[in-house]
Image (cartoon, rainbow, N blue to C red):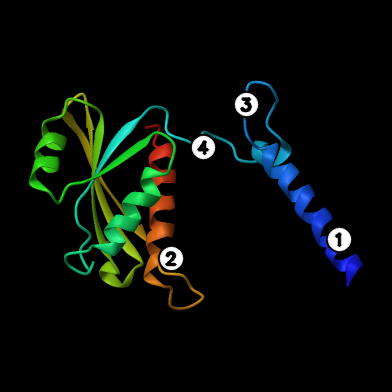
Amino acid sequence: MRRWIGAAAIVLVLAGGVLAGCQNSAQRPACAVCAANKGPTELSRHWLLGMNPMAGDPELLHPFTNRFMADLGGMPGVRAIDLAPSWNAHLFRTSPDDRIEVSTVLHGGGNCMEITYTVYRHGTEHGRFGQVVTPLYAGPEPDGACVDRAATQLYLTLVRAGL
């Protein structure tokens, strides 16, 4: 039993070392694992993301809208705000900053989530785009896991678009 615990500790230390080496800082080059990911991994500048209440989310508390906002708000270069209060929506829509308005439908069309987002640069609409997060083939997915996966996929889409 002690050998197994010792081996598990060594594996955890090695895995932590590999992951810590993936922090791409100016002091050290990216590790081989990070080098395999070709392209940027975060937004090129800060964006304000306005979240409309998610269709299919239970009223009043909006747990999945809040979870989606928390997921995206934790990503680098993102400030997420709730557009449900009218004062937030007004300030968001009149802001001259670069911003993205996001509307989502939980389990829309039999998918995990359908996402529509509008990009505004310097106060004017730059484009309107959509994304579908397909269901997992492994079977039913909890709503929370679907929301987390959709937030990650939306963020990666925005990064790949060069935003």
Instruction: Identify the residue at horizontal 47%, vertical 35% (top origin).
Output: 42
What separation in Å lies between label 1 and label 2 (alpha carbons)?
31 Å
Q: Earlier in the sequence, mark 3 or mark 2?
A: 3
| Secondary structure of residue under mark 1 | helix
Residue flagged by tag 4: what amino acid is it?
Answer: Thr
What separation in Å lies between label 3 and label 1 (alpha carbons)?
30 Å
Q: Residues within 10 Å of mark 4 (few under 14, many from 20)?
A: few
Q: Which dot, 4 or 3, sits closer to the camera?
A: 3
What separation in Å lies between label 4 and label 1 (alpha carbons)?
33 Å
Residue flagged by tag 2: what amino acid is it?
Answer: Ala
Q: Earlier in the sequence, mark 2 or mark 4?
A: 4
What separation in Å lies between label 3 and label 2 (alpha carbons)?
31 Å
| Secondary structure of residue under mark 4 | loop
User: Looking at the picture, does residue 107 appear above or below residue 68?
Assistant: below
Direction right: furthest residue: 3
Going by the image, does 79 lie left or right of 35?
A: left
Going by the image, does 34 lie left or right of 90?
A: right
Q: Earlier in the sequence, mark 4 or mark 1?
A: 1
User: Which disc, if any, is residue 41?
Assistant: 4
- Can residue 80 be seen here? The reply is yes
| Picture quadrant where residue 37 is located | top right
Residue that carries the numbered disc 3 in the rendered image: 25
Image quarter of the C terminus? top left
Instruction: Identify the residue at horizontal 34%, vertical 57% (top origin).
Output: 67
Which of the two residues, 21 or 128, is positioned nearer the viewer here? 21
Residue that carries the numbered disc 2 in the rendered image: 145
Q: Position of residue 48 (x, y in %)?
A: 28, 35
Q: Residues within 10 Å of mark 3 (few under 14, many from 20)?
A: few
- Can residue 154 be seen here? The reply is no
Residue flagged by tag 1: what amino acid is it?
Answer: Ala
Q: Position of residue 86 (x, y in %)?
A: 8, 46
